[in-house]
Image (spheres, helix red, strand yellow):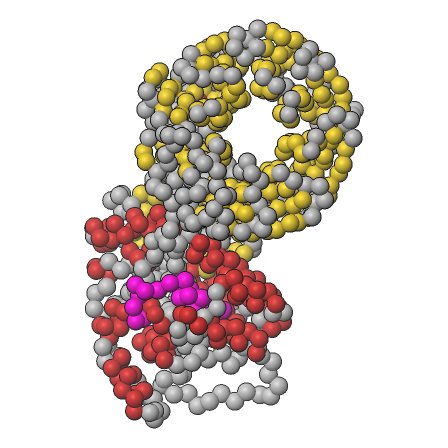
Amino acid sequence: MALHTGEPESLGGYRIVGRLGSGGMGVVYRATSRSGREVAVKVVHAQYAEDPVFRARFRQEIEAVRRVSGAFTAPVLDADPEAARPWMATQYVAAPSLAERIRGYGPLPGPELRRLALGLVEALRDIHRAGVVHRDLKPANVLVAADGPRVIDFGISRAAGSQTLTETGHMIGTPPFMSPEQLTDARSVGPASDVFSLAALLAYAATGRGPFDADSPYLTAYRVMHDEPDLKPLTPALRDVLARCLAKKPADRPGLTGLAEEFATIPAEEFTVAPVTAPAVPPAPTEASAPASRPGAAPGAGTGPATEEDGDHPDRDPADRTETPDALPAPEPPAAPPAPRRRRTRLLVLSGTAAALALALTGYLLLGPQSGGSSADTGTSDRWAAVPKGWQPWTTTVAARAATGVALPPENSGDTGTPSCALGGDGLYCLGAGGLPVAVDTRTGRMLWRVDSSPTSSPYGRFGGQVLGVRDGVVLLRQSPEFSGEEREATSVVALDARTGRRLWHRPLTGTNVRPALDAGLALVPDGATVIARSLRDGGKRWSADLPVDHACDFHPAGTGLYVLCSRWDGDAPGSRLLSLDPADGTPRTLARLDLSLRYLGALDGRLVFVRETPESRSDGGDQSYDRLVLVDAAKGTRKTVPLPAGTAGQPALTGDLLLLAGSNGRVTAFSATTGARVWRTSTSLEQPGAPLGDAAGRTAFLVSGSGRAAALDLRTGEVLWESLARAARSPGSGYPPTLFRRAGALVAATPDGTLFSLDPAHPDRTPGKA
């Protein structure tokens, strides 16, 4: 929709391009970031922005939503709860809500309903693993995207509990999809409440009606608490599962794991209404049961929830309907057929106390973390290795003040993505903000030094590059200054003293197709198509070797050998050549001729392991896909090709004899590196995780997400052992993956916003100190 007069043109660095809608909480705009990424920006109404209690709760909700940003939600990309009008920006999902879908086209067919059910179960599992309960799962809060549902708006409801939003006569909530416990004691609500809401939502998606629908939201609330659900139109198999989910007592409802298995066993044709063998004769309507007509409902769509999407508010954002904006008068006792006296008495009491019921319906309190991560040993007390002596959990950033050298990075250093880092002894060495090299003590997080070590200067004070490695007290970098215009000085290889940051030597890079490296204790510096091996400490020349002309070459470490993969993409003979160089004198030997698009993963039983990227891999920031592993004997050059199943994608890593792939949706899959067979697959709630990392004992795999959430998985079964809270200051707004390192028993990570942190896998919930 077009912007209204006086609405902002930009907000928080995002350019507003249109209005998506408005609701009781605020206005939602469609916007673009500086990079062109589309986002949805929600701005709180001015009257709520003036309430300090609302602001405090809004701030808590932003952090809660960040913890659960994953494959089935719209991740929070940015937010400012302290602005004059608090706002947050989430990923823009170009998809209708489930409520719009059903209003426009009627109930879902069996296959589509089955996909929705399975997707929502996974979404809720991810949300609950983060220690959060949604509490407002309804059709308007589910987006029906092509690749699966997205659950939205599960944080603002707590802010809606502010006193200014609970005036007498206002109902906040969506009774047709609320659990009984939400109506009686909202603060006691747990994950089972979301199971109840899920079942009510699925019944609505199958029939166009909620299982407790009535004329009034108050009567609907009464039915939720006291009546059995109306599931008669459903097939027996689906009816049985949903009936158990709609049990009045939370303890009687199935868990999500068992629910996923049950949904998976029901055929798609049974995810629908029961077949009608004779004309159905509807019962005579009563005031208590007659459905209200809804303007604009599609034929066959039935009636929607009493509090949702009426024609009086056509511009209201379908993703932001957590409250009814108009005051609801206290209803008169409904005219109903004769009923037992006890039941009618309860109904009169309920309907005669509208204010009390409205208060009960404000119970949308989002739970804080149940635990930042379990410190329990899950029955394997010897799983976790000891952390280094003197270590403590910590968090810092690459922009922190350094003890020596350049104290702070340049003011105009900008956002350069995930720092390039490498471990060496007790130090983590990174090219951080502005590309200035820094050293961090991995035991305490203290910033030891920051140096402007470039042999050239930049008018911006900004440098790009990479930490190539750390060995024998030397940090090797590839570093280049950033210039405007056509004048650019050569990129250089720079060696620094790891203890002080002092520059030991540098050499310009004159070759563009060979990447410099630190391998076999040597600095490998290209000079055209020749690579020169130099001493790490003084840069003295050891030997030189000629590499294939017109090839792009990368060195790959594997034990004591020295291996380089050179690829040519055009010409008469495109392809790759794997060479072995003698570390003593550089004598080259061709080991094997291989396919293009190979990515090196590591060594396994004397073989170099590569994975081949598929030509169909996405180029829009999605997961890279792969179709095979290639294992090359490091001594003989013989090779073995291991096909991978279709759809294999994610951030790959070789951990022991397993190929692990972490998808951007948090799903981790393990394959045998020798047979290609899938060993296990599991889902985590981590968003945009980087490549997995195994422990030294080969028992555990670790992941870290773009927001600085970590997870541990059992390598044998894929079981999620724990997930931690977010450590990053901001959620990632780019496609840069985080990186993860292992320092003895501790984990050290770097995230796209420049946050660095360390945690103990045996106690991931310990609060880190500020370095």
Query: Where is residue 508 shown, x and y percent of the image?
Result: 55, 11
- Front-lying residue, 345 or 305: 345
Residue at x-position 62% and y-position 8%: 542
**Span colored in magenta:** 183-202
Q: Is residue 197 magenta?
A: yes
Residue at x-position 36% and y-position 80%: 226
Query: Where is residue 722 shown, x and y percent of the image?
Result: 46, 48
Q: Inspect this view and state whether residue 152 appears.
A: yes
Query: Where is residue 261 shown, x and y percent of the image?
Result: 57, 64
Q: Is residue 273 magenta?
A: no
The residue lying furthest to the front in this view is 382
- Front-lying residue, 500 or 630: 500
Task: Name the quadrant containing residue 16.
Answer: top left
- Front-lying residue, 50 or 4: 50
Task: Name the quadrant containing residue 587.
Answer: top right
Residue at x-position 59% and y-position 65%: 264
Q: Inspect this view and state whether residue 208 appears.
A: no
User: Looking at the magenta stretch, what is its main secondary structure?
Assistant: helix
Whether 190 is drawn above or below 547: the answer is: below
Residue at x-position 75% and y-position 18%: 589
Query: Where is residue 83 shown, x and y percent of the image?
Result: 27, 43
